[in-house]
Structure formats: C-alpha cells, structure tokens
Amino acid sequence: MVEPLLALREVGHSFGGLSVLRSVTFDVPEGGIIGLIGPNGSGKTTLFNIVTGYIRPLAGTVTYRGAALERDTIQQRGLQGLVRTFQTPQVFEQMTVLENVMVGCTKLTRTTMLQDLLRTPAARGQMREIRERAEAACERFRLGALRDLPAASLTAGQRRLLEIARAVVGEPRLLLLDEPSSGLNVQEIDDLRDWIVRLNEEGITILLVSHDMGLMTVARTVHTLYFGEIIASGDMAAIQRDPRVREVYLGV
Amino acid sequence: MNPRTLLWLAIGLVVWAVLPFVVPRYMADLLVFTGIYTVAGLGIGLLLGHCGIVNLAQATFYGLGAYASAYCTVMMGLPSIVGFLVGAAISMVLAYVIGRPILRLTGYFLALGTLALSAIASALFFEWDWLTGGTLGIGGIPKLDLFGFLLDRPSRYYFFVWIVAFACMAVARNLVDSRTGLMLRAMRDSSTAAAALSIDLQALRTKVFVVCALFGSLAGSLFAHHASFVSTQSFTVDRSISFLLIPVIGGATSIPGIVVGALFVTFLPELLSKLGDIHQILFGLALVAVVVLMPEGLVGAFGKLRARLAKRGSGHG
C-alpha cells in the first residue's frame, strides 16, 4: 500500500472541557483532493489548525510523509510543503498585490540579515528571482492588472485568489483551503473550482474544508464531520445519499 | 533617476555642504545632533514602521554606546574606534539576550517591556558609578581624529556625523527593500498569515531589534565624542521617548521622514525656547497636533498634500 501524504490517527481536542474533536482518523493520499464538510462548529477549522501547527492536539497523531509532525512549528511545516489559506482571507493589506505574492516566494530562498543590510550581489539576485516568480504568478492568476494596488483595495474574490496565488508560488505539496468559497459569488466559485482542479492536476494535493456542497463535488473523497466526529466518508454522491448526513446536515 | 530628481538631489547636496558654514555655531551644533538623532531614530523607525513594534528602550543602547566610548578612551586610553566597537558589541548582545524573551510580547505589553528596560538601564547607569561616573559623569572624551584631521568644531564634526547618518540610511533602505523587508511588512500586516508562509516571526523581530540597538549604540558613541562629557541625564526614559517621537513625527515607514523627525525634536524645542517659559507647552501642543492631524507623520502628510495638489492641477488642466 502506498503511504498517504498526510495521515490523521485518533486525533482529539477540546477547549476548556468542551470536546471539539473525537478520535478523527483519515488519510490524504498523495495527489488527491480530499474534502471535509460539516456544519458550523463541527471542528473543521480546529482540525485545520492542528494539521498546520497553530494548535497542538491533545490526543492522536498527525503524520506527514511518514514522519510525525508534533514537534514541527508552523514555519517548519510550511517549509515541508504544507501551506494553508484562511477562512477570512489574510492578505497583507498595506502591501501591494505583487508584494503579497513575493512574500509567498521568500521561503524558497535564503539570505542572511547581513547580506540584506549590505545589499550583496547574492541578496540582489535572490530578490530578482523572487520578483520574477511573483510577476509570473500574478499573470497566471490574472492579478497582473492589479499588481501595484494595495491588497486592502481588493474585493473578496480577488483576495481569495491572491491568497491562493501567494500559497502556490511557495510550491506546496499539500494545499489546505479553509472555506475558500465563503464570500464569493457564483461565477467566482466556478472559477475557484477550476483553479482547484488545475492545481491538483499539476501535482498539488488538496485538503478542502467547506460547507459548500456544490464546491465539494471536486473532491474525490469527502469526510463529514459532525460535533467532532466523522460520521460518513465517501464520494460526494454517496455522502449526499447517506441518511445520517441528510439528517444532521440538511435537517431531513 | 530623472533629471528633476537629480537636480533636487544636487541642490540638497549643496545646501547640506554649505549649511554648517553659514549658520550660527549653536545651529551647527543642533545640526550635528540632528545627524546623531537620525542614526538613533532609524532603528526605531525600522521597528515601528516595518514591524509595528514600539521601542521605548533606545536610550539604553544610546547610553551603552556613549559609555563604552567614554570608558575606553578616557579610562583606558584606547583608540576611539575601540569604543565604537565595544559599545556596538555590548548593545547587540544585550538586545539579543533581552529581545528573545520580551519580543514574545506584542502591542502595549511589548512597549511597556521596553520602557521597563529603559528605566532599569537608566537606574543602573546611575548606580554603577565606578563605570559610568554616576551623575558626575565622565569628562574629557577626546574629539575624533580622522587620519590626522581633528574633528574639533561642530562644522567639522557635522560632515563626519552626517556621512555616518547617510550610510546608516542606505543600510536601512537596503533592509527595507530586501527579502527581509518584505517579510517584516508581511508580519506587521498579518502575523498569522506570515507564519503560514514559513516566516519565523520571533527570529526576525529579534534580528531587527539587534539592528536597532546597533544604530542606538553608534549614535551614542557619536554623541560622546561630540559632547566630550557623558552623564546619566542624557540616557533617561525621557530620551527614549524623544527617540520614539522621531519616527512618529517624521513618518515611520519613510527613511527621509526620520531626518524630518530628528530635525523636529532637535530644532523645535530650541526655537520655541526663545518664547520663554511657555516653550514646553508649545512643544507639547505641536507634538499633539502632528500626531493627531498627521497620523502618517510630516512626510506622509506632505505626500498627501502633493497628491491632492497634483489632482487639482490636472483637474483644471
């Protein structure tokens, strides 16, 4: 059996005695698109925070490429190719669109503070490389016309796209998208779906959290989280037929 | 660079070069202080404008630089350069050791942490009189000697201080334009997202704090060789506050803004003092006016004004 890219085993967490995740176990295979649905408060974002290192789980293990992640910081996980977006897009508001994307490239290069202070040829070369990569990414994600605008002036849809572009320039292996369709209109959600499919075809594994059933159709396997437990898993069609999911999710 | 910028730069350079010879001596003296304060203020500006960190401890590093220069030259008879280097080394090590723990704090708590550092340092400068001379201070610090050319008058020292200040401005500019600068601004705008993009917030903040301390110490050494005398009064919490005012007034994200801020805190109190006892109140009012009416500092306000005028001009044309 091929080892999964990301594996969660019996992950549990609680906040002040309130249990939010109970023995959650699932795999994210390399190259897949895995969905995680569930109503508000079902623990989706907590699970995301555990995988990306913002929260340490109280129980269970998270393994990435066969190694336990427990001791790795958020930054170390990022360097290993685990990159997330946020439920509310977190753009760097006072920076331009291009600069935002450039920040996403910074982890691909290394300069010391001294090199940057003295503007050595190495530092200049790396900065040029960062800029070129970011410019190409702006064009690709159709942000070229906006690239010199401050990110604060973008619409919700543009912010979402910028956040994805900024994550993708860092060459992630596993991209974790947290509610990427929230705040978007129908057209923008369609575009988003196209992007997810295209990025996946390029080899990026995707873990998608959403309560948007429509967007979830891109996922090959969907896990349904309800009050901290996985109550159903399968493709979207199977999930939609599942009586328990229908009961808790659709109220029928 | 377009010809117009070049022309302005040339005019600025000429004004800069003749200034110490045409103004009265006390003003040349103030201009030297402006240069020294620019160096100290640059560090604070990097922290405030690019990291969102309020540093109220710059007088500590300014004091360390000044005392290192005073002690090394007067007490030990070493060359001036040793004082500069010893001050810089001690300041950077201290900034690293203290920065690691206190830079875990954010916002007001961090500001208070740095304020505490300044208060403690100021008390130690007073208590450790075997090292600092206490309130009596250390006098007789020699003037700098640059390859046999003695910088013994404000008009001479002026050029040295300002060349150092320009070099520091260039270094600060490099940092702002670099990969590190990008990461700093990202961290300032959203630390959560910066962490997700593998930016090590703690390490980066500590490094900038160390650079800030280096600038502070350098300014302190420059001050010691200018004043020839250092004592505890120069390194109090008050001084830390006036250093913080430099980027606040001038504009924290702008490097020329630091010079404007330094001019403000050196010249305005001096000019206002001619008006008698009321001058401190007037300085306070001017300060409040700038902070309330121009949140981006004088340089930011000037930029906005120019943009508005340009818009109006094009609207009519």
Image (cartoon, rainbow, N blue to C red):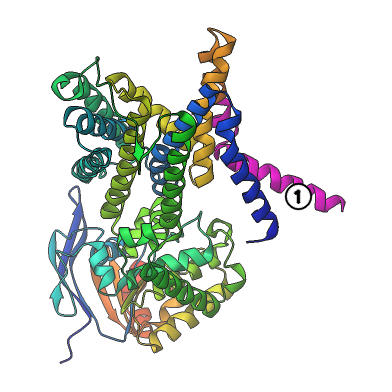
**Badge 1: how crowded within 10 Å, few (<14), some, or many (20+)?**
few
Judge whether residue A250 can be spotted in this image: no
Which residue is at a point 19% across and 24% down the rendered structure image? B124
The total number of labels drawn is 1
Which residue is at a point 31% across and 25% down the rendered structure image? B235
Compared with B5, B72 (above or below) is above
Q: Residue furthest bottom?
A: A1
Residue that numbered label 1 is attached to: B310
Q: Position of residue A180 (x, y in %)?
A: 44, 69
Q: Quadrant of residue A144?
A: bottom right
In the rendered image, residue B311 lying in the magenta stretch gets the answer yes
Element type where label 1 sits in the image:
helix
Name the foreground residue: B145 vs B83. Answer: B145
Judge whether residue A82 can be spotted in this image: yes
Compared with B278, B68 (above or below) is below
Chain ID, mark 1: B
Q: Position of residue B25 (x, y in %)?
A: 52, 23
Q: Quadrant of residue B117?
A: top left
* Magenta residues, start to end: B288-317
- In this rendering, position of residue B261 left or right of residue B240: right
Query: Mark 1: which amino acid?
Result: Ala
